[in-house]
Image (cartoon, rainbow, N blue to C red):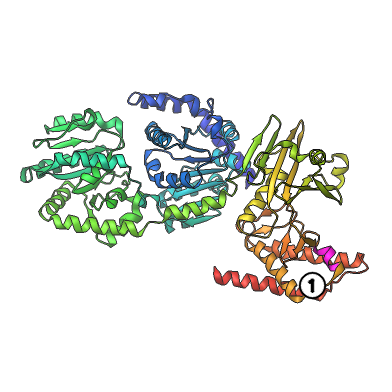
């Protein structure tokens, strides 16, 4: 599978490379109406990289302005929860870029810095260059902006990826299935997918995605800017005595139908004002020409045109003000639905308790419209005649518009909670947000600032601590481990990583080149940190070092020493464990397995017991979290237990006194099974 995926990705990369001239031509053609499309090419081709202060943080990718607006509640929570973590928002369209830059300015006034750039095109070398520079701790992707080279490089560089607010229609799923040899491995490169609804989740799982959960729709948690409300309040006095019909996000082919309906309606209802808001800015002038041809009295918002009693149509040819128009409306038509565009977001209108009208083509928001239909909370229209009769009914029965809007608002409020569910997964994938990094020309160190407020790379050298008189002891097993006294009164364990086996006789401590995040020390550090967040009994990681060399790297780690403990191998030379202690140990091992933690060397030397009767597990080099999707039979858990049993039997054979009998393992298994049963009941 991986080999065929590599070949298909190579073919895909060659194809997009061959299509580069057409891509440039497309951007230049778009730039005839919007000059921003021919600007900032250096960012799109990763020739200009983001500023250094954007590195090692969170990257949030929102394709266009719609996704960016939907993501605002999530962005707000991310900034609140991780104020010291670099935060970068990327996009692909100039309109989204303008909206992000506006948010940048607002946040800068509050003392919070947001970085922004275009996401490079999905060429393999460009994407790898950009990601290696940024090295984000987490990449968040809105909806289904999935690119094979982006995701493959994130996987290779150990960058977690979380797709949020994902939706997948039956038609899109069919397209993915057609190229399953490329799309299935791509989906499996994603750490987790959080979908808007159950149907999307089922489709992603059917396509081969590994970890898919339903989190809900971000658009049910609209973040209304103060500026939007202030604008609506300032414009409201101009509309006294008018009935306001807002048609939002309209497309070519719809404007003509809406204006035909309005021409008929204005005869009977001269107080009706149509606020027409085209979806794309390049159509603003075309719609203005259409209004002139229809001989309608209109004003343009872009030139600060304000309506008076004679104004028939107010052209909303301004960006970022749709929420203000919705607040002013008596009822709202949702564009993109009279043509086969799939419809746009009705949730914004629902959030303001406005009655919603929509055409038949709503597959982009199918679930929302199904819920609205079940509650009889919107008005379906398909023709000009439908528009005329529905708007007539709403004008003649204003209480109907109010009641329908209230139903929509109630439904909107019932569906909230997506941000909280998404943040729960962000917290899971961002366990080391508090960790600081120290870089030199050939070394990278991670350290916990609460343990080492003023950190130096010299801390990884035993000579430094010896000069300070802070070495309290050492352990000489296969290799020396140093015990270091710390200023906080605790002790740390300094361990250098060595090669084992025959290779270790020729190459003592140099490892093959690989990304820092995947190196021996960093992998153990991040695993320990995650397990500490899960409150598993493991030592606290203090610092880790990745030291580059000409042909590889070396690694060191500093871990807090657990005080007053004895390892199980030495303890059993002194006394036997009680059945209660064996059951307790079994329950501890079960707690690790419930979190899918695989200990590659679970033996009696790596299990400690402290004076309070708490068991601890240590030495997590080459250990990992084994996802159920990758190991469906879960046989490694039984193999872990058998590894411990073999080590106990081995020690018994080699030592003259060792208080262990093979049948005592039954007590450990009982504790393991009981803990597993309790966990399933809780789940």
The residue tagged 1 is 577
Residue under the point 63% across and 70% down:
676
Q: Residue furthest left?
A: 268
- Residue 188 shows in this picture: yes
Q: Does the magenta-highlighted stretch encompass residue 213?
A: no
Q: Quadrant of residue 210?
A: bottom right
| Residue 330 x %, y % | 18, 49
| Residue 194 x %, y % | 48, 53
Specify whether 674 is left or right of 64. Answer: right
Specify whether 204 is left or right of 506. Answer: left
Specify whether 539 is left or right of 146. Answer: right
Q: Nearer the viewer, residue 196 or 436?
A: 436
| Residue 471 x %, y % | 81, 46
Q: Nearer the viewer, residue 15 or 124?
A: 124
| Relative height, residue 662 to residue 132 (above, below) | below
Dominant secondary structure of the magenta stretch?
Answer: helix
Q: Quadrant of the C terminus?
A: bottom right
| Residue 455 x %, y % | 68, 39
| Relative height, residue 673 to residue 416 (above, below) | below
Stretch of the chain drawn in magenta: 567-572
Specify whether 103 is left or right of 228. Answer: right
Label 1 SS: loop
């Amino acid at each position: 599978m991986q080999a065929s995926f590599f070949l298909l990705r190579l073919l895909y990369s060659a194809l997009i490379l061959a299509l580069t001239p057409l891509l440039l031509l497309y951007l230049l053609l778009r730039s005839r109406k919007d000059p921003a499309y021919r600007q900032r090419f250096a960012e799109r081709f990763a020739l200009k990289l983001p500023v250094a202060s954007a590195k090692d943080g969170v990257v949030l990718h929102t394709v266009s302005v719609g996704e960016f607006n939907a993501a605002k509640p999530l962005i707000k929570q991310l900034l609140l929860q991780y104020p010291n973590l670099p935060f970068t928002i990327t996009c692909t369209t100039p309109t989204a870029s303008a909206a992000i830059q506006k948010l940048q300015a607002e946040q800068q006034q509050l003392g919070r810095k947001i970085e922004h750039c275009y996401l490079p095109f999905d060429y393999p070398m460009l994407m790898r260059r950009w990601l290696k520079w940024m090295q984000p701790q987490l990449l968040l992707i809105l909806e289904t902006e999935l690119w094979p080279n982006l995701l493959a490089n994130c996987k290779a560089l150990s960058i977690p990826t979380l797709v949020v607010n994902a939706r997948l229609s039956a038609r899109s799923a069919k397209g993915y299935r057609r190229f399953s040899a490329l799309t299935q491995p791509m989906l499996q490169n994603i750490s987790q997918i959080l979908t808007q609804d159950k149907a999307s989740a089922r489709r992603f799982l059917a396509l081969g995605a590994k970890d898919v959960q339903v989190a809900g729709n971000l658009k049910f948690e609209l973040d209304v800017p103060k500026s939007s409300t202030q604008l609506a309040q300032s414009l409201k006095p101009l509309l006294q005595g008018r009935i306001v019909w807002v048609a939002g996000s309209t497309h070519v082919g719809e404007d003509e139908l809406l204006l035909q309906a309005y021409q008929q309606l204005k005869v009977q209802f001269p107080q009706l004002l149509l606020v027409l808001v085209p979806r794309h800015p390049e159509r603003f002038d075309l719609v203005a020409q259409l209004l002139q041809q229809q001989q309608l009295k209109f004003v343009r918002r872009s030139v600060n045109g304000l309506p008076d009693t004679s104004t028939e149509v107010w052209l909303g040819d301004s960006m970022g003000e749709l929420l203000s128009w919705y607040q002013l409306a008596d009822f709202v038509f949702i564009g993109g639905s009279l043509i086969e565009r799939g419809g746009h977001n009705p949730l914004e209108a629902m959030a303001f308790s406005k009655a919603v009208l929509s055409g038949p083509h709503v597959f982009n928001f199918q679930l929302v419209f199904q819920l609205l239909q079940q509650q009889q909370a919107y008005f379906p229209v398909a023709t000009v005649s439908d528009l005329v009769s529905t708007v007539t009914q709403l004008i003649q029965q204003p209480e109907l518009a109010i009641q329908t809007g209230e139903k929509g608002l109630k439904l909107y409020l019932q569906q909230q909670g997506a941000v909280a569910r998404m943040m729960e997964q962000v917290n899971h994938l961002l366990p080391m947000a508090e960790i600081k990094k120290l870089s030199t020309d050939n070394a990278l160190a991670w350290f916990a600032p609460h343990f080492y407020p003023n950190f130096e790379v010299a801390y990884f050298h035993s000579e430094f601590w010896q000069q300070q008189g802070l070495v309290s002891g050492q352990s000489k097993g296969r290799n020396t481990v140093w015990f270091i006294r710390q200023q906080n009164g605790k002790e740390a364990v300094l361990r250098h990583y060595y090669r084992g086996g025959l290779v270790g006789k020729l190459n003592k401590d140099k490892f093959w080149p690989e990304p820092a995040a995947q190196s021996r020390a960093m992998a153990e550090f991040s695993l320990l940190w995650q397990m500490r967040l899960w409150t598993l009994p493991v030592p606290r990681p203090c610092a880790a070092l990745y030291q580059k060399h000409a042909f590889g790297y070396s690694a060191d780690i500093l871990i807090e020493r657990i005080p007053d403990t004895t390892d199980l191998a030495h303890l059993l030379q002194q006394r036997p464990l009680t059945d209660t202690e064996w059951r307790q140990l079994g329950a501890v091992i079960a707690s690790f397995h419930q979190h899918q933690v695989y200990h590659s060397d679970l033996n009696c030397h790596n299990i400690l017991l402290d004076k309070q009767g708490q068991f601890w597990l240590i030495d997590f080099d080459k250990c990992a979290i084994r996802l159920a999707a990758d190991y469906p039979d879960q046989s490694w858990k039984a193999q872990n237990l058998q590894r411990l049993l073999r080590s106990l039997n081995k020690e018994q054979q080699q030592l003259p006194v060792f208080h262990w009998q093979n049948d005592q393992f039954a007590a450990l298994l009982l504790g393991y099974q009981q803990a597993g049963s309790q966990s399933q009941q809780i789940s």
